[in-house]
Image: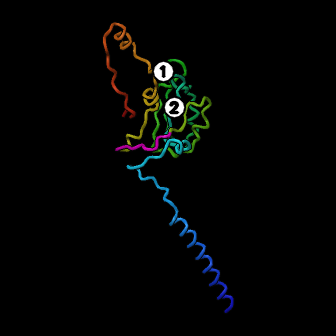
Amino acid sequence: MIKAIIDNLKGLYSLLVGLSITGRFFVSPQKTTHYPRQVDDPECLKSYRGPLELVPADDTGQSKCISCQMCVRACPGHCLTVTKGDKGKAPKVYLYDFTLCCLCAACVESCPTGAIRFSHKVYLVAPSREALHLDLLADLLARAPNPPQPKAEAEAEGEGNQVLAAPVTGEAPA
């Protein structure tokens, strides 16, 4: 009988502790960001792991990647595809399937040149899964402040003709 009373008092104490924790969080200010009306400041997002991006080597949009395939071998989700280019060590194709990525950082840690990193793209939205198959070389070129120009465009600009470049999309070729 005394054991049953003691067990009931222990259960009541446990219930009161749980209710006090719930009560404290109930009256504390809300920490939720209401997205359309509010956005997080960039200072809070420094540690956020978004989709991968290539690190530029310079202002022309060239990558630090040497096509060593270490990131492809280290990735447990098999979400990276790297194809060596014809000239030098620069990759010709660098595709990333964000739908398969588990954001484990194995590829980032295995890269000997530090050519890939996590982006801070918090508000990434896609209409379909195929839109999350990203071409990281095209994305790097779009982010470059001084992108290289093809020969035909450079010659046309030298003659005084104005040539408009087509916008680069972030989608991988189908």
Q: What amino acid is labelled 1 in the image?
A: Thr
Q: Nearer the viewer, residue 37 or 85?
A: 37
Up-down: is 47 above or below 28?
above
Q: What amino acid is labelled 2 in the image?
A: Leu
Residue 102 x %, y %? 52, 46
Residue at x-position 45% and y-position 21%: 146
Residue at x-position 52% and y-position 62%: 28
Q: From this viewpoint, which residue is outermost toward the top?
A: 159
Q: Which residues are magenta?
A: 120-127
Residue 32 x %, y %? 47, 55
Identify the residue under disc 2.
Answer: 54
* SS class, disc 1: loop
- Report crowding for label 2: few under 14, some 14 to 19, many 20 or more residues within 10 A (C-alpha): many
Residue 8 x %, y %? 62, 84
Quadrant holding the N terminus = bottom right
Identify the residue under disc 1.
Answer: 60
Up-down: is 172 above or below 35?
above
Q: Nearer the viewer, residue 80 or 164?
A: 164
The number of numbered badges drawn on the structure is 2
Residue at x-position 38% and y-position 49%: 36
Left/right placement of residue 77 relative to residue 165 reads right
Residue 151 sits in quarter: top left
- Report crowding for label 1: few under 14, some 14 to 19, many 20 or more residues within 10 A (C-alpha): some
Left/right placement of residue 100 relative to residue 12 reads left
* SS class, disc 2: strand
Nearer-N-terminus badge (1/2): 2
Quadrant holding the C terminus = top left
Residue 47 x %, y %? 56, 43
Instruction: Please name which of the two marks, 1 or 2, marks the residue nearer to the observer.
Output: 1
Main SS of the magenta part reads: loop
**Disc 1 and disc 2: Cα gap in Å?**
13 Å
Residue at x-position 55% and y-position 41%: 46
